[in-house]
Image (tube, helix red, strand yellow):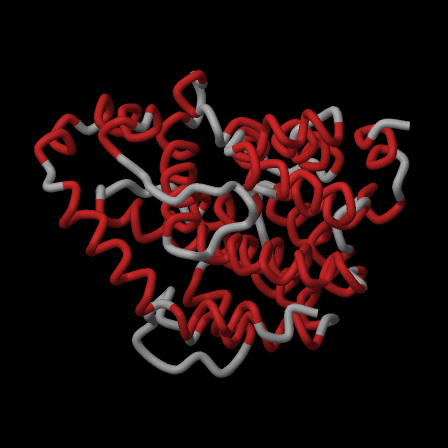
Amino acid sequence: MSLLDTIGGAQEFATLPTVATKVLALLEGETADVREITQVIETDVSLTLKILQMANSPLYAVRSSVTSLNQAVLSLGLNRIANIVLSVSIFSKFMMLSRGQSAQYMEAFWHHSSSTGMAAKSLATKIKRTFRDVEFIGGLLHDIGKMAMIQFDPERYEQSVKLITETHCSDLEAEMEIFGVDHATTGELIARLWKLPKELQTIIGHHHHPENLTDARELTAVVRIADMLCEMWGAGVGEGIEEVKLMEEPSWQVLCDAIPDLRGLDIEVFTFELEDEFNRASSFLKLITNDAA
């Protein structure tokens, strides 16, 4: 049985965690009720605590201390709350399922995912693009196909990482060799099973080649650049990237086509500033990494 067939029939990948499913369903309605959404979230004490921690983190920089869930929802807005609920629910669920070798890889995976989300948000801010925080959640979820590979077969996942190290092939090539499918295709299947918003499905399934997209090109390019930079900055998860030359990257060209002024940037200074923001966000990264289970 192939990995995709296994995932399609696996109970743990069949649906999103209950609270995340309910919150997304409420938000899809024409009139989302803050009180109703708050009541759903409050049924999960650990999730409520995590939202309060994140609401008071440097990521959102609210003006006054957030002390209640209702205040968090009002301060951050429904889209941001939905993003937090989605990301924390997913990673809490799968960190709990991790044992032995898969737990080791999942810790590195979660660090890369949270780092990419942060870097994508910083990049979007620097180029003055507003994606409603979808760049952050997209960064968090872009590699969920790797998460599935780690969960179902950590031994074969280790083989793919070894192949990348030994041959310097891409992670997509190594996964095709070892699993017969790559993490982008695997992740897109999971995103469809979970009925995630279309933009997230696009990011997850196509983040390696945003230049081939017609929809969500800029958004996916932002996530891809953040993904590569985090690999280079030591927050990687097996892709093996040691150097990123932005001017030669198709993802950067996507952004330059949309924002011509980027062509005149001092790339060295630009990436240094992004890395500095990434390093200063380390306390936040520890916050969302700690107690993920």
Identify which residue is drawn at 22% across, 43% down: 128
Residue 156 found in image quarter: top right
Residue 3 left/right relative to 242: right
Q: In the image, is 3 to the left or to the right of 111? A: right
Residue drawn where x is 68% and y is 46% of the image:
25
Query: Where residue 217 sits: x, y (%)?
Result: 40, 25
The quarter of the rendered structure image containing the N terminus is top right
Q: Is residue 73 left or right of residue 153?
A: left
Q: Position of residue 108 (x, y in %)?
A: 58, 59
Q: How many marks?
A: 0
Name the image quarter holding the C terminus.
bottom right
| Residue 34 drawn at (x, y percent) | 57, 61
Q: 61 or 70: nearer the eye?
A: 61
**Residue 279 versus residue 61: which sits nearer the camera?**
279
Q: Is residue 157 above or below residue 57?
A: above
Residue at the front extreme? 166
Residue sitting nearer the eye, 266 or 34: 266
Q: Is residue 55 above or below residue 184?
A: below
Q: Residue 14 at what x, y percent from top left?
A: 83, 41
Q: Residue at x 36, y 67 (%)?
A: 281
User: Where is 104 relative to 135, above or below?
Assistant: below
Q: Residue at x 41, y 51 (%)?
A: 230
